[in-house]
Image: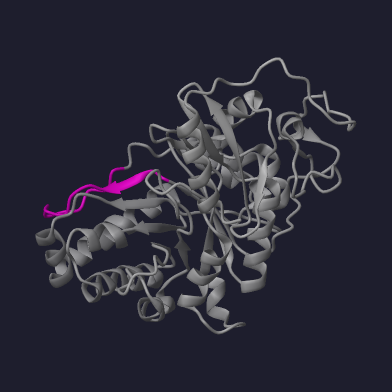
Amino acid sequence: MNAVILIGILCLVGLCTGTISPRTGKSRKGKGKTNSKLHKGPVDQDVFQRNLVVENPKQQDILYESGGYFRDTKYRRFKADVLGYVTPWNGYGFEISKIFHGKFTMVSPVWLSLPFGNMSTYQLSTDAVQTRWIKEMRSNNNANHSVKLIPRILFEHWSMDDIIRLYSNTESQAQLIVTLLDAAQTFHFNGYVLEIWNQFIFAGANLPVVTSIVRSIAHKLKKNNVDVILAVPPSRGSQVELFSKQQFDELAPYMKAFSLMTYDYSSIQRPGPNSPIDWARQCVELLVPKKGDPKRSQILLGINFYGYNYTPDGGRAILASEYLEILKLFKGKIQWDDKSKEHFFESKLAMGNGYVFYPTLYSIKHRLDLANELGTGISIWELGQGLNYFYDLL
């Protein structure tokens, strides 16, 4: 059954029956053995050997097994590009990037911003840069495997006047490039993820203007051996797409990759799966329709390592620790929505029913299989938000 329809029905039932308290004191039924040993850190078997990649995961298996990961963290199952984002507000992500260094080809710290465009010289905000982490990551590189460090730059609070000035003024463009090249040289960055597309479109710029600006930046950086990855919005099925095949084709020659944000399909106003798998497939095929086209390798299919807890008063995104706390109190069955290829369950709250969507080994495996089938890489938002054993899949 479609998860969105199912949740709608369940929400109505929950509202009609009034307040429901969490069930307590009930013994777990069934003859199967429950794992009582908490696994944490490196273990001798991967998630496949531990028989954990299953359609019907058990609550106790997730609680006891998810902290453990296969000790050979250099072994890669997924052979295409893997980009992992890390953020300053989640320090554990930086630890994850070091532990699983061998699993990634690129890591993007969310450090940088260009907060305004109305200045004569562009000042890149670099206060959050962690030079010690950069050295530690680079020290793990070797002849067989190296990870490129490609921080994200957020172009925030730009007005239309700022955007047009950059578009029409070659001196402004040259100054911006100098700023980016200086930072790359100072901090030994391999490139940048540009988060500029949505910001400029929503500020009022049209597609040709934004395309021209991005192409100019990427072209000049590429000439200086600095990689550029463009964060792009997924298809929303609207008549006018924010980013289409036309823009992809125009920009592809200048880009290292496109970070396709195939998550947040649902919302608090419309609860449901985070990234229905047919939608994710469609988002890739709209940009590069032809199967086997090598340009698909430039697409990094977005995979979320966070989930959502939908509650009667709205809900919010949740990370691994919050998910496990909710799961400890949960006594029912984790359900599989075969249409979206995602797991979810109904939680009992004092104010009514809640619904939790959070990735599992089985749902992530489906998305990695999809990326392999389509010939894309993947991008993960974000490292440190997921369960440790997720990385056995990469």
Would you say residue 56 is visible in this rendering? yes
Residue 162: within the magenta? no
Would you say residue 274 is visible in this rendering? no
Name the foreground residue: 192 vs 290: 290
Name the foreground residue: 266 vs 2: 2
Residue at point 44%, 67% (across, down): 225
In the image, is 130 to the left or to the right of 203?
right
Write down the quadrant of residue 229 in the picture: bottom left
Position of 194 relative to 95 (above/below): below
In the image, is 21 to the left or to the right of 114?
right
In the image, is 194 to the left or to the right of 227?
left
Position of 188 relative to 277 (above/below): above
Residue at point 39%, 36% (across, down): 314
Q: Position of residue 296 (x, y in %)?
A: 55, 75
Please identify the dominant SS of the magenta region. loop
Q: Position of residue 77 (x, y in %)?
A: 74, 58
Q: Position of residue 4 (x, y in %)?
A: 51, 52
* Magenta highlight range: 110-125
Residue 114: within the magenta? yes
Q: Position of residue 302 (x, y in %)?
A: 52, 58
Which image quarter holds the N terminus? bottom right
Residue at point 45%, 33% (across, down): 15
Q: How many marks?
A: 0
Residue at point 63%, 56% (across, down): 341
- Please identify the residue farthest to the top as the structure is shown: 25
Write down the quadrant of residue 254 in the picture: bottom left
